[in-house]
Image (cartoon, rainbow, N blue to C red):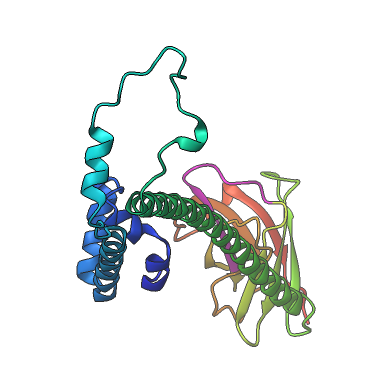
């Protein structure tokens, strides 16, 4: 809330009347030190209240003293036949200065309740605004995630449909006969992508590693981080020649040479 909204909230009027809790009054004083316009508004409210009080204090007329003495004088004893209560029409009316003072008090009370009402409305509005902002942030986050996912799928589609990429199917071995994976390889550009397919989740402390068989020797093409939202995983570039590809289960971080007894899938490259 900016300074103008803070001034219009009515909290300064409550502060001048001395009705704020100590902690909130301290906050108003701190705001007044930081913002001269708030201090100026407090002075204006004080001067206005003083002016109202001065207007309410009318100079008594000369005959007022005698009237008061007459009212304080003992009344003559009433007879039993006289009513103990005077008729309503003969009750004493309020003096003008008393009426003005009462009006001033009523105005102050009304101002306090009005300020409290608008302050409560402001708090409720602020809470609703925070809720809307939180919802907007959640929607923005979901939108960004969906946009990234759409971009990823678009990139994957461009790779799998590109004639520059050769698709090599890696079939399950005796270690994992139901496993299946795919390699998309652009030999000319030395680009390599892997679709994990149906590889099972690796156990704790283990990680899959892709190997290219080049002239009968395994060459690491990088380790694989499985991601449910990602179908194609970019593997290590630089593989421009290979006769086959295989995936083994290795210690986390990969190995310098494949663990053959933990080979899950393998596939040969078709000759062009």
- Residue for point 44% across, 61% down: 256
Which corner quadrant of the image does residue 48 belong to? Answer: bottom left
Residue situated in front as seen by the camera: 269 or 15: 15
Q: Is residue 22 above or below residue 180?
A: above
Measuring from the top left, give residue 11's x and y in whole percent: 36, 58
Measuring from the top left, give residue 226's x and y in whole percent: 59, 56
Left or right: 73 with respect to 195?
left
Q: Residue furthest top?
A: 80
- Determine if residue 244 is in view: no
How many numbered marks have been drawn onto this rendered protein structure?
A: 0
- Determine if residue 164 is in view: yes
Residue situated in front as seen by the camera: 14 or 111: 111
Where, quadrant-wise, is the C terminus in this rendering?
A: bottom right
Left or right: 188 with respect to 124?
right
Measuring from the top left, give residue 161's x and y in whole percent: 80, 78
- Residue for point 25% across, 50% down: 64
Does residue 23 show up magenta in the picture?
Answer: no
Residue situated in front as seen by the camera: 192 or 42: 42
Left or right: 52 with respect to 190?
left
User: Range of the magenta residues?
Assistant: 199-212
Measuring from the top left, give residue 182's x and y in whole percent: 72, 64
Where, quadrant-wise, is the N terminus in this rendering?
A: bottom left
Residue situated in front as seen by the camera: 111 or 267: 111
Q: Is residue 188 above or below residue 159?
A: below
- Residue for point 22% across, 39% down: 69
Q: Is residue 39 above or below residue 262?
A: below
Does residue 202 show up magenta in the picture?
Answer: yes
Q: Is residue 55 above or below residue 264?
A: below
């Amino acid at each position: 809330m900016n300074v103008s909204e803070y001034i219009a909230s009515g909290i300064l009027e409550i502060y001048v009347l001395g009705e704020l809790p100590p902690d909130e009054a301290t906050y108003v004083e701190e705001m007044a030190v930081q913002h001269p316009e708030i201090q100026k508004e407090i002075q204006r409210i004080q001067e206005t209240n003083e002016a109202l009080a001065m207007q309410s204090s009318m100079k008594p007329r000369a005959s007022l003293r005698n009237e008061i003495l007459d009212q304080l004088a003992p009344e003559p004893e009433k007879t039993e036949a006289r009513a103990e209560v005077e008729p309503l029409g003969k009750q004493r009316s309020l003096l003008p200065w008393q009426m003005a003072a009462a009006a001033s008090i009523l105005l102050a009370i009304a101002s306090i309740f009005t300020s409290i009402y608008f302050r409560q409305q402001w708090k409720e509005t602020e809470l609703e605004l925070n809720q809307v902002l939180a919802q907007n942030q959640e929607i923005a986050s979901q939108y960004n995630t969906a946009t990234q996912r759409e971009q990823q799928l678009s990139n994957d589609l461009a790779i799998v449909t590109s004639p520059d990429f050769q698709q090599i199917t890696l079939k399950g071995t005796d270690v994992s006969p139901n496993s299946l994976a795919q390699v998309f390889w652009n030999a000319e550009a030395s680009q390599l992508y892997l679709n994990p397919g149906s590889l099972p989740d690796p156990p704790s402390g283990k990680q899959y590693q892709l190997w290219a068989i080049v002239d009968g020797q395994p060459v690491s093409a990088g380790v694989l981080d499985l991601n449910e939202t990602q179908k194609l995983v970019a593997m290590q570039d630089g593989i421009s020649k290979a006769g086959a590809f295989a995936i083994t289960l290795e210690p986390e971080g990969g190995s310098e040479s494949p663990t053959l007894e933990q080979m899950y899938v393998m596939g040969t490259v078709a000759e062009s």
